[in-house]
Image: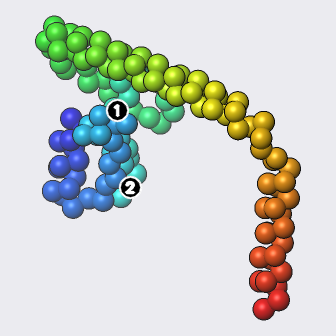
Amino acid sequence: MLEAVSAYAEEQGLSLELYHNTFMPQQIELITLPDLGIALADIGENPRETLAEDTVILCGEFLNPEADAETEAPLKERFTKLVDEASAHIADAKAQHDMLESFYSKAMDFEAVDDTGNQLFNKILALTTAK
């Protein structure tokens, strides 16, 4: 529906901004129409808190729930599996990082690094004020 609205807005010459879904960049998640002072968002199945002046239209009631369930179930299952895999890879990367850090952090002189940074900053500052 958001694709149809954005196409229509473009046809009408309206200024619009499109924001896409992080996981599925081809899917529009939010449209703002600044000239009209409105925004349209796909808020999913469970609407979050809304403001008193917000109008929420639950479009699910216009769909065929049986057809949607057949199509949606495998997609939700795949999405959950991919998020779980990604989380496992991130946890593994964190563990690898922590292990590597344990080797070099003992050899780091953080105070010397800070002192060198401060000296460099002061030299740059002195050069800019000298001109």
Q: Look at the image and tell me whether residue 66 can be seen.
A: yes
- Tell which of 119 and 56 is nearer to you: 119
Q: Seen in the image, is 127 located left or right of residue 5?
A: right
56 or 79, which lies in front? 79
Foreground: 30 or 21? 21
Taking 127 as reference, is 108 above or below it? Answer: above
**Residue count near mark 2 (Cα–Cα under 10 Å), binned few <14, some 14–19, many ≥20:** few
Q: Which of 44 and 27 is in front in this view?
A: 27
Q: Can residue 76 be seen in this view?
A: no
Asked if residue 71 is positioned above or below residue 89 in the image, the reply reads above
- Measure how far apart labels 1 and 2 are at the Cα level: 26 Å
Q: How many labels does the image show?
A: 2
* Left or right for 83, reference 95: left
Which residue does the image show at 20% across and 56% down from the upper left?
A: 10
In the image, residue 80 sits, relative to residue 17, either above or below, namely above
Q: Residues within 10 Å of mark 1 (few under 14, many from 20)?
A: few
Q: Name the residue under label 1.
A: 23
| Residue at screen point 37% across, 36% down | 22
Q: The C terminus lies in which quarter of the figure?
A: bottom right
Query: Residue 34 shows which numbered tag?
Result: 2
The image position of residue 112, as x and y in percent, is: 84, 54
Q: Mark 2 belongs to which amino acid?
A: Pro
Report x, y in % for residue 29.
Answer: 33, 37
- Against 96, residue 22 (above or below) is below
Query: x and y percent of residue 56 in the render?
Result: 37, 29
